[in-house]
């Protein structure tokens, strides 16, 4: 079998593929930070009780402040921990192992809440707000979504108009995380006069005309605050507009890339917690005179969970290790978000299954994990929309060079060899290269056959996006083989199976597309479903 | 009588209007706020998906097949208008 390490790489070509990880700048040792979080939250975070109460206790928020969690991403010159994206992800994952509602609060604060101000704020804005945000005295919220604008933020109606000394903001936002806790809202609005000219605007919670709605009742992360936000002629000074005028929509999408990464880290922590609980349970619980973990079906579940958690950690680490510029993480953060949100749901679902009826009871905490993570497939960009976006990006760019794949394959192969997986590792990497070639061929085929009209075929865009997600994550997991060779190998195979299935779906795509159209159109026209007659 | 914008002989202003109105519709903007020099991504917040929507819409209206590779070179509103003009020229020989 050909060894990809032997093949001479082709000359370098221009490529706009996702950049590869670089080393994060040196920063404070992370181990003690994670240990302190673990120690404090193991004793003080009662996620089940918080879920029942529907709120985070003041004492827990105070503990989070003492741990420095609200200043994770803020530089030490403003009183924060100054952690890079990768280290912040580890912190959020650690919090999520104990309490997803707290992780959502802190993650949103550090991601969407603080990132726009850090990236776009003037020195005066930063000096005013960052120390307060770092200490957690002020908690941040991000308000973009509206009743008529969910994943499509260009449709927002909230607007601002020039007023004496600044602007006035009017509108109604929904699903505002941290709504009841926040002292500062970053609001996406558009200029009333032009309907264009979007802007991100920092608005203190104390501003006249700003009203926070009641808490929403949710399926999961019930202890996190989710409210609407009503803005009625809210006056703000002109310097509250972040960044260049008119680029607010792009700035919001850039902030979402950070938010998606931090949210993916929360998914990792959730999956780790579900996996740890399940691993203990299947060894302890006996049925038919044996621990249930000894049965083949249980072993398959446990191995699949291990592979998924390992792969989730790997892709989040890869995004976190990228140069911390928003542009560089835009594509890979989307991959991580889709993969980790689906992965957390899969892992918690397997955990429920292996816990049997006990898992269905709230007191085990497993049901809470499953409820808490479900929303991650929806917020920060619904996965369906993100897959469409990713698919259209893959279709639009043709510069992904094979030599880059070979380079990544070699990195994975070297890691596999160091981990002792010689010929099996080579076969695995060869399979990855073959599937990567198949994906490139599928993209070229769609470009040639559908052209720009591919935008009307979301099924095809999703197929290539899903194959891309699986292969990206597989390469990250294989490159991390040294941590757990067997788990990495299993993850690699499972992910490549997923990539193969995604590409195979293109074979019968036209017929399936037409059937789905016929079924849905018939149902829409009739306005009702069929009768159950027999 | 006004010629359809699909005609090479249609007024340049009509083709410009078509492109601007299509962009405005996709991004829910007022057409008169779309400047010729505006960059589709940086200034208007378009991404690959909305760019493809724009080109797909133009492709349907103009009844021409637009090449994906070439289309992705487009950076500004003015580029898009030039792209449409070039395609109409080619389509009409």
Image (cartoon, coloured by chain):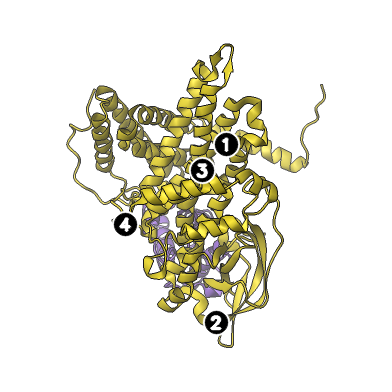
Chain colours: A yellow, B purple
Give how far apart the Cα atoms at labels 4 and 3 are.
Answer: 23 Å
Q: Residue at x 51, y 22 (%)?
A: A283
Foreground residue, A486 or A139?
A139
Q: Which residue is mark 2?
A: A237
Label 2 to label 4, Cα distance in Å?
36 Å
Per the model, the C-alpha gap separating discs 3 and 1 is 40 Å
Among numbered discs 3 and 1, the one appearing first in the sequence: 3
Label 3 or label 1, whichever lies nearer to me, is: 3
Measured in 3D between alpha carbons, the distance from the residue under mark 4 to the one under mark 1, in whole angstroms, is 51 Å
At x 29%, y 51%, the residue is A22
Checking the image for residue A54, the label placed there is: none
Report which quarter residue B32 is drawn in. bottom right
**Which of the marked residues, 1 or 2, is nearer the chain's N terminus?**
2
Q: Give the letter of the chain under mark 1.
A: A
For mark 3, what is the residue? Answer: A97
Placement of A420 over or under B6, stated as above or below: above
Going from N to C along the chain, the mark reached first, 4 or 3, is: 4
The residue to which callout 1 is attached is A513
């Amino acid at each position: 079998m050909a060894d990809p390490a032997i093949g001479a790489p082709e000359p370098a070509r221009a490529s706009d593929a996702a950049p590869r990880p670089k080393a994060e700048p040196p920063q404070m040792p992370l181990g003690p930070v994670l240990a302190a979080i673990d120690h404090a939250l193991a004793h003080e975070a009662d996620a089940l009780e918080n879920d029942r109460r529907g709120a985070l206790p003041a004492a827990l928020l105070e503990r989070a402040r003492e741990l420095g969690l609200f200043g994770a991403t803020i530089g030490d010159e403003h009183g924060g921990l100054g952690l890079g994206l990768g280290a912040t992800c580890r912190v959020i994952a650690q919090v999520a192992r104990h309490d997803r509602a707290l992780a959502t609060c802190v993650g949103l604060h550090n991601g969407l809440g603080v990132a726009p101000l850090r990236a776009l704020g003037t020195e005066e804005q930063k000096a005013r707000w960052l120390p307060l945000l770092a200490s957690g005295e002020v908690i941040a919220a991000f308000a973009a979504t509206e009743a008529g604008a969910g994943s499509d933020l260009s449709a927002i109606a909230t607007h601002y108009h020039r007023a004496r000394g600044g602007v006035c903001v009017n509108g109604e936002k929904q699903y505002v995380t941290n709504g009841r806790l926040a002292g500062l809202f970053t609001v996406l609005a558009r200029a009333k006069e032009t309907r264009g000219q979007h802007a991100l605007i920092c608005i203190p919670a104390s501003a006249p005309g700003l009203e926070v709605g009641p808490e929403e009742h949710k399926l999961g992360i019930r202890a996190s605050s989710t409210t609407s936000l009503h803005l009625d002629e809210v006056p703000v000074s002109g310097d509250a507009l972040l960044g260049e005028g008119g680029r607010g929509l792009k700035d919001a999408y850039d902030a979402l890339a950070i938010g998606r990464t931090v949210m993916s880290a929360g998914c990792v922590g959730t999956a780790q917690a579900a996996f740890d609980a399940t691993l203990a349970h299947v060894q302890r619980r006996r049925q038919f005179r044996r621990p249930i973990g000894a049965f083949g079906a249980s072993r398959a579940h446990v191995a699949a969970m291990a592979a998924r958690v390992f792969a989730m950690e790997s892709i989040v680490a890869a995004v976190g290790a990228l140069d911390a510029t928003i542009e560089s993480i835009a594509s890979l953060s989307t991959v991580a978000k889709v993969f980790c949100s689906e992965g957390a749901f899969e892992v918690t679902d397997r955990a429920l299954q292996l816990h049997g009826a006990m898992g269905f009871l709230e007191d085990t905490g497993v049901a809470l994990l499953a409820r808490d993570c479900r929303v991650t497939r929806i917020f920060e960009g619904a996965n369906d929309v993100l897959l469409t976006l990713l698919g259209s990006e893959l279709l639009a760019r043709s510069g992904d060079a094979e030599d880059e794949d070979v380079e990544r394959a070699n990195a994975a192969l070297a890691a596999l060899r160091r981990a002792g997986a010689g010929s099996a590792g080579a076969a695995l990497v060869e399979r990855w290269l073959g599937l990567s070639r198949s994906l490139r061929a599928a993209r070229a085929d769609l470009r040639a056959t559908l052209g720009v009209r591919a935008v009307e075929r979301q099924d095809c865009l999703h197929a290539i996006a899903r194959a891309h997600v699986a292969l990206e994550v597989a390469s990250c997991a294989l490159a991390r083989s040294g941590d757990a060779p067997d788990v990495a190998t299993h993850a690699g195979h499972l992910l490549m199976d997923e990539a193969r299935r995604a590409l195979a779906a293109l074979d019968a795509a036209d017929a399936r597309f037409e059937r789905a159209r016929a079924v849905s159109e018939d149902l829409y026209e009739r306005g009702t479903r069929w009768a159950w007659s027999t | 009588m006004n010629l359809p914008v699909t005609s090479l002989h249609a007024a340049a202003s009509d083709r410009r209007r078509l492109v601007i109105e299509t962009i405005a519709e996709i991004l829910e903007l007022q057409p008169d706020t779309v400047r010729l020099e505006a960059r589709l991504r940086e200034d208007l917040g378009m991404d690959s998906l909305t760019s493809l929507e724009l080109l797909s819409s133009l492709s349907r209206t103009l009844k021409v097949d637009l090449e994906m590779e070439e289309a992705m070179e487009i950076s500004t509103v003015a580029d898009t208008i030039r792209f449409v003009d070039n395609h109409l020229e080619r389509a009409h020989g």
